[in-house]
Amino acid sequence: MNIAHLLLGSAREFSTLPALARGTSVHLNYRDLWRKVSVMSMHLTGRFGLKRGDRVAFAMTNCVEAIEVMYAVWHAGLCAVPMNAKLHAKELAFILENSGAKLCFVTPDLADTIAEAAKEAPELKEIVDVTTRSYSFMEVGDPIAMAEAEATDPAWLFYTSGTTGRPKGATLTHRNLLAMTLNYFADVDRPPVGGSIVHAAPISHGSGLWNFAMLARGSVQVCPESGKYEVPETVELMNRWPQCSIFLAPTMVKRLIEHGSVADLKPDALRLVSYGGAPMYVSDLKHALDLLGDKLAQLYGQGESPMTITHLSREMHADRAHPRWEQRLASAGRPDSCVAVKVVDEDGQQLPVGEVGEIIVKGDTVMSGYWNSPEATAKSLRDGWLWTGDVGAFDEEGLLTLKDRSKDMIISGGSNIYPREIEDVLNLHPAVAECSVVGRPHPEWGEEVVAFVVPREGKAVKPGDLDKLCLDNIARFKRPKDYKFIEALPKNNYGKILKTELRKLL
């Protein structure tokens, strides 16, 4: 079973529909995309001499060529290694070396960086810039048959963001990717034929993983000409390609709803915003629902179980009359159809409703292991269960609420304090743009709570006002003992706040 079969099916069923668009212009329809991919795969195996299972990396800002490369790789029976375009050269060098990639495709802005990184990757034989004749020559020739692939063959090496230590390559098989795609239809949405997806978030990450479901339904995959997320451009593209399903990180949703150009969105432009990577603060989520309408769905997943652990459906977002509406919005939703999810103690024993423990997950979406890292694999995969490192609890409705990463929990005076709960309260203050809570060593209590706060531009925030807000909403012992006001929170290339950097500031 080769995941490229999805493209073959769409080429037959939706042959004349646009498959790829560069900005507002059609790049290829489904028939022509299939032909190009099958010819490119001939070059991968012939001209470059790649064999089944070899890894092919790419480092590109979002562009239509990234989709072409991925499907050519799978068509040839190879394994894709998408790399985030914002990574440092040393991080890219590690991924190239660790994956053993033999070929790497790049956009011009990353050509020099990859050339430097390649010095640390002895197995990398060639770098192809997708704007050069070397790439365009890959269109020349006759199509070849799709390579056979086993369901357990590696298809995508998903390198973690590496917020602590070096990134690890979660090995996603053809079965993992297909299960994730079918789960989208079961739990997230069934988009209409001829809809669209605008790749505003990195194709190397969540947005790219959603490509399968969109492609299987004959949607056009749209890459911004800028290659990045700019709100006015994104709004223009959603208007040009209506019935748009888009994946955004919570920080990207916040930028969208706070930008004036969101008022230019046409009624039929946006179908669905699926957000993930981190929970969204309830205050931001309510604002987004008021502004965009009932068009939001949340997913909770990891690279190790891509886009698939739990989901909070569009219907639950929309059910404002429900007595627990706000509590539901604060949750990560119910387990996905394709997986089993538990909250357990340190010994792996399932905990009752309401008790906090580590989240573990099992199912066909869970990775086969970390690439070339048996020790890390053994630590994370136990008896078929993925130990996520995330902490949470189920409620009586079967909804999972994320507390924090286990390493981010604060223990003060013997009490467990979850930063997320305090951050939710601080974000209620109208002058707070962003905040993050960490623990600081304390000689008597073990740790004390410290809040880093980014004020909104032109606004002043007083510690006393934040204290009162906390005392009005949460237990006194959870209140921050210190507030640090900063211009911006440190974040990684996926938009996640780096609490390790905040601790260093303390």
Image (cartoon, grey):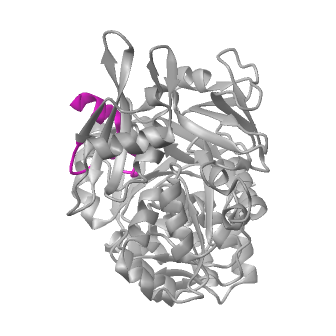
Percent across and percent down for residue 201 are 45, 63
Q: Residue at the spot x=38%, y=36% of the render? A: 437
When asked about the image quadrant of residue 137, the answer is bottom left
In the depicted structure, whether residue 104 falls above or below residue 120:
below
Please indicate, yes or no, whether residue 449 appears anywhere in the rendered image.
Answer: yes
**Foreground residue, 467 or 116?**
467
The answer to if 486 sits in the magenta stretch is yes
Q: Residue at the spot x=75%, y=64% of the render? A: 185
* Main SS category, magenta section: loop
Percent across and percent down for residue 404 are 52, 35
The number of discs equals: 0
Furthest residue toward top: 444
Percent across and percent down for residue 5 are 72, 65
The answer to if 497 sits in the magenta stretch is yes
- The residue stretch that appears in magenta: 485-506
Q: Is 187 placed left or right of 210 in the picture? A: right
Q: Is 332 placed left or right of 97 in the picture? A: right
Q: Quadrant of the C terminus?
A: top left
**Foreground residue, 123 or 296?**
296
Q: Residue at the spot x=49%, y=64% of the render? A: 69
Q: Residue at the spot x=36%, y=80% of the render? A: 260
Q: Is 126 placed left or right of 305 in the picture? A: left
**Foreground residue, 304 or 82?**
304
When asked about the image quadrant of residue 452, the answer is top left
Please indicate, yes or no, whether residue 99 appears anywhere in the rendered image.
Answer: no
In the depicted structure, whether residue 190 falls above or below residue 480:
below
